[in-house]
Amino acid sequence: MSKHLDRAMTQLRSDLVEQFGVVEQMIGLSVRSLVERRPELAHTVINTDDQVDAQEIRIEEDCLKLLALHQPVAEDLRWLITVVKINGDLERMADLACNIADRSVSLDYYPLFRVPDDLTKMVGAVIDMVRSALDSFLEHDPELARRVIKKDDEVDFLNVEMIRELEGKMREDPELVEPGLHCFSATRHLERIADMATHVAEETIYLVSGDIVRHGRGSEVSSDGAS
């Protein structure tokens, strides 16, 4: 690897870590705005989206320039391809955080509606997935990436439980239908963030081993090799 390529890839890594930090904060604030009924936090999230979009474009352009100028091969090529994909995942996470913030603003019109307690568990699991997915990428840790992928099942289960609780609330009181749908939409966006974290983990496995594990292809997700 040339010194110029090495420096550029180090800068890209730093830019991606910074983007991860901003997106993680957006996710946390969007959920706090929902649970704590703080619309000012929701507006902070929404106003940050342009910053994330601009950074996403810069990172992608830098990756494409390096691919064109240096024509990297093997591990360097896989790393740059992975950065392009993860960069896109982060931008989509930010969009989903904005969607949650939008639902939070809408719920502010229904101060008597109580957000289900299980949402806190779901939030904790999703944020843990996002952080662990980043760590797996930065540390080239496929085992941690596999744990992220397996944790997605826990988030899916919590999401189903949330839907059941919300459906029960709406059946009992028709006046809760509209706020219930806003909350349902927010939990769905949160579940999609978990899917994006899973994709980051899958790309990390590709980066380290060259295996494509999406859609059941390549190596098995379980660390012991069992199907």
Image (cartoon, grey):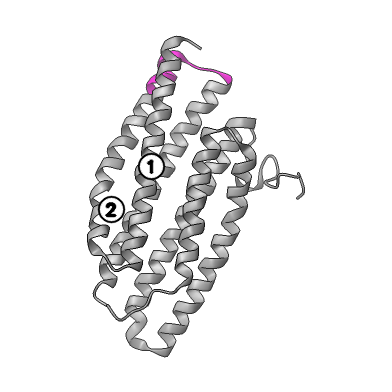
The residue under the point 37% across, 74% down is 181
The residue under the point 41% across, 12% down is 4
Question: Looking at the rendering, which quadrant does residue 214 occupy?
Answer: top right
Tell me if 38 is positioned left or right of 158 in this view. left
Q: Which callout, 2 or 1, points at the residue further toward the start of the chain?
A: 1
What kind of residue is marked 2?
Val
Task: Tell whether position 66 is magenta.
Answer: yes
Secondary structure under tag 1 reads: helix
**Residue placed under numbered mark 2 in the picture:** 45
Would you call the spot at circle 2 few (<14 residues within 10 Å), some (14-19), or many (20 or more)? many
Secondary structure under tag 2 reads: helix
Question: In the displayed image of the protein, which residue is found farthest to the bottom?
Answer: 172
In the rendered structure, which segment of residues is drawn in magenta?
64-74
153 or 69, nearer to the observer: 153
Above or below, 119 relative to 197: below
The residue under the point 48% across, 78% down is 165
**Residue placed under numbered mark 1 in the picture:** 21
Position of residue 2 measured from the top left corner of the image (x, y, whole percent): 47, 10
Question: Looking at the rendering, which quadrant does residue 123 occupy?
Answer: bottom left
Would you call the spot at circle 1 few (<14 residues within 10 Å), some (14-19), or many (20 or more)? few
